[in-house]
Image (cartoon, helix red, strand yellow):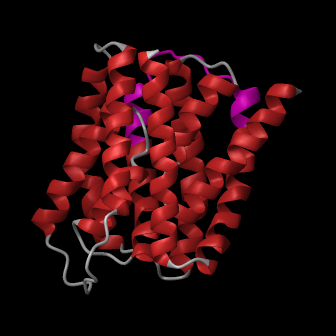
Amino acid sequence: MTASILALFAGAVVGLALGGLGGGGSVLAVPALIYLLGSTPAQATTASLVIVTLTSVTALVGHARDGNVAWRTGLLFAAAGIVPAMLAGAAAGHLPQTALTIAFAAIAAVAAVRMLRPSPAKSAGPVRPGKAGAAGAGLGAVTGFLGVGGGFLAVPALVGVLSLPMRRAVGTSLLVITVNSLAALGARAGTGTPLDWAVIAPFTAAAVLGAWDGKRLSHKLKGRTLQRLFAYVLLAVAAFMLIDALV
């Protein structure tokens, strides 16, 4: 019973992050599964991909209805990242867990700092396939290496590299997360990692409901407020993971 309640609570928080911020789901889901629900890192990584994939699809539908998904940009990002994600995922399996955790924390912190830096207003111009493809390939490699959906890096990339407005970046990142997570799950399908569906099911259900609340929250807050909130969440998670890895 306790595990189910914890799963419901953690799932609601992950859903709020994905629905309102367009990312942060895996960043929050992996620590929750490990530290609150007793999963091993391998189980947590795979389970979080299942949870985040289903939740992202739900949130994506809502943002798409509002016209906040740049489909061409998102598909270029996602397509370019599929192969790098698979290759990086295979390489990550040969590295110590501590090294992966430290890398995870460092990347999250860098993304957070980038989001907190004030940037000049930019008008959304035509998408350059080469630029979108290069950014997507880099994102896919990091996603595969760290075993996360990648939204916490997709949002800064879509805002800072491709000059999408924050709300449109949030919606588009959900498309990228869905494709990247499906690719990562496909690569992990033959690993035989056991999954605790008694935890995954309530976690996912709460996350899906939370995603709708997060979407409504995104309409009530300014884009810059969302950006700063997202950054502070990333900094907190990065600090926690780094301390845990080093202590």
Q: Nearer the viewer, residue 242 or 5?
A: 242
Looking at the figure, which quarter contains the N terminus?
A: top right
Residue 219 appears left or right of 98: right
The magenta segment: 182-201
Q: Nearer the viewer, residue 134 or 113?
A: 113
Magenta stretch: dominant secondary structure: helix
Residue 27 appears left or right of 209: left
Q: Nearer the viewer, residue 142 or 46?
A: 142
> Up-down: is 65 above or below 78?
below
Residue extending furthest toward the left: 130
Q: Which residue appears at 55% of the width and 26% of the height?
A: 44
Determine which quarter of the picture holds residue 48: top right
Q: Looking at the picture, how far across and down is residue 176, in whole percent?
A: 38, 56
**Residue 69, visible in the rendered structure:** no
Q: Which residue appears at 42% of the width and 26% of the height?
A: 188
Q: Looking at the picture, how far across and down is residue 128, in whole percent?
A: 14, 72
> Up-down: is 35 above or below 6?
above
- 179 magenta-colored: no
Q: Looking at the picture, how far across and down is residue 63, in whole percent?
A: 54, 73
Q: Which residue appears at 51% of the width and 20% of the height?
A: 41
Q: Looking at the picture, how far across and down is residue 180, in whole percent?
A: 38, 46
**Residue 44, visible in the rendered structure:** yes
Q: Which residue appears at 56% of the width and 41% of the height?
A: 28
Determine which quarter of the picture holds residue 163: bottom left
> Up-down: is 89 above or below 108?
above
